[in-house]
Amino acid sequence: MSTHARPLAEWLAASSDDVLVALFRARGVRPDAGWQDFFDAAEALLDPVALNRVLPTLTSAEASALSAAASGADAGEQRTALTALGLLQVDGAPFPPVTTAVRDRPAPAAMQRTDPVPSETHAAALAAERALTTVSALADLLLRARERPLGLLSGGTVSAGEKKQLAENGIPAEAVDPLIQLAVNAGLAAADGKRMGATDDAERWLRFSVAERWSALATGFRDALPRGIRTPSGGWLAPAMWPSAYPWDPTWSGRSAALRERARLLALLADDGSEPAWSAPMRTGADPAAHELIALLPAEVDRIFLQNDLTAISPGPLEPALDVRLRTMADRESAAQASSYRFTTESIARAVASGETETSILEFLGGISLTGIPQPLQYLVAQTAQRHGLVRVSSDAQTGRTRIESVDQNLLEAIAVDQALRPLGLTKHVGSITSRVGRDTVYWALADARYPAILVDEHGRPIAGDRHPLVRTTAPAPDYSALIRALRSHQGPDADAAWLDRELDAAVRARAVLRVVVGMPDGSTRELIMEATGLGGGRLRGRDRAADVERTLPVSSIRSATVIPQ
């Protein structure tokens, strides 16, 4: 145990709960940390491992100030921030373990102030086109994640298998991770264990206009930027300054490059490093100027061509709300300014399963079609809608088993002998089929096998099946209330005595040599140099170096004890 931790322990004990919460969050403290008192907390915060974790999180200004303080200079305007992180004492001097940790790191170079160069017309036009591509690709990604969440690796990135499948659907594999991060920053996607799924905010975002979509992504990107590249006005520093924002973080070079790439994908940064006109307001902390970007994009359309071959052609970028609904009933085959869609039995069945009806589908298509509704498409919709619900899946309240019923006995016979459904353990029972497997699992197995199944409740009313529920938009912040209560419960008027006991116990275990100041009965004090050998029963035992004799001292008489470095 280090005596250097005592001033920090006293500062922690005197701090408010809000100050402690801010410190614990900044230092990445676990809410279930096994600290008994503020002495434990101070020692843990000044441990070399903990310091090596916090020093890379310091901004350029903070790192420079701490480096100067370790050399005896004043930390200046960064003193308050560094004290709040538990790195400086109240008088502005670094704690000795901090000084030791900082001396092993190079003094940071001062950040050179630069201003962005405005984009030329051609560079701005290319950037705007890329923004549209990014927004469209991210919409595709979220629609895919809504149907089936993306698999994640242990590091939190999307697996190679998922990227390969996404590449087959027109999303470049190298763009998947940046797109996912943009979605996470905007609250549109969130990790749920080993899966990445869409959030409830994504449902609303998918129906926004292009301008609203881009504004939400740009705002989310800005709000998630590390504090080292944020400005007091709420904007960001010029991207050319980003690489030097965290001088003690060995991973920052790659992270800053990734941030610049995301800024480029959002057209906040042009390919040549210049700044488009719509990016400048956001850099200074203002709202996104989406109108300037939208002015360079092709106009959206609200009509399509329906063709006899069961395809639909959009003559331009289809309005997002129309595109999202159309894709619940048709598969998009190509994505460009003129997109194509194909209607199939499976796509219509998917729409009906999600709540559409024959009437709602035909009314929607008739309202946006420039060519009416071809007869083959009308027939496909009618036939698929009529077959939907032939197989009804429910739970039997009496037996707890899942029941499969249908008015078409031939269809039930086909289900009973389907080899793909053998894992369900299906059993015939009084004109139906039952299974011990849960209702939802049975339903989705039938749907995957392309049977016209629906879920019904105990009253026979259809209910929606949700294989992949939406993920929560935000995760709760760490709650340190229990930890702080535990620390305060050991805080009392005998803190000095408790600290002395800890110092003596550590000295005994380390066989350290102590300079002990002992209070005498007459009120005077006496200083002894002792090699600590034992502690128990309220007494300290050790060898007096000067007299070369064993002494036993009452701990209650010891005024102070200081370790003498050997």
Image (cartoon, rainbow, N blue to C red):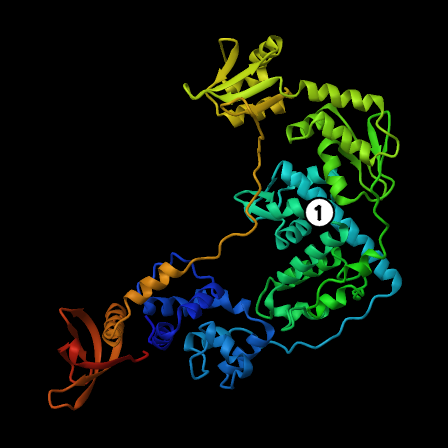
In the image, residue 364 sits, relative to residue 524, either above or below, namely above
- Rendering quarter of residue 355: top right
Q: Position of residue 200 (x, y in %)?
A: 60, 45
Q: Position of residue 445 (x, y in %)?
A: 57, 24
Q: Position of residue 75 (x, y in %)?
A: 52, 82
Give the left or right position of residue 375, taking residue 13 as reference. Answer: right
Image quadrant holding the N terminus, namely bottom left
60 or 403: nearer the viewer: 403
110 or 140: nearer the viewer: 140
Q: Position of residue 279 (x, y in %)?
A: 76, 64
Q: Residue at x 41, y 19 (%)?
A: 398
In the image, residue 59 sits, relative to residue 299, either above or below, namely below
Give the left or right position of residue 2, taking residue 200 as reference. Answer: left
Q: What amino acid is found at the position of numbered circle 1 in the picture?
A: Leu
The residue wearing badge 1 is 138
Furthest residue toward left: 521
| Residue 13 visible at all | yes
- Rendering quarter of residue 493: bottom left
- Rendering quarter of residue 536: bottom left
Q: Residue at x 27, y 67 (%)?
A: 490
In the image, residue 407 sits, relative to residue 251, either above or below, namely above
Badge 1 element? helix
Q: Residues within 10 Å of mark 1 (few under 14, many from 20)?
A: many
Q: How many marks?
A: 1
| Residue 170 visible at all | no
312 or 153: nearer the viewer: 312
Image quadrant holding the C terminus, namely bottom left
530 or 233: nearer the viewer: 233
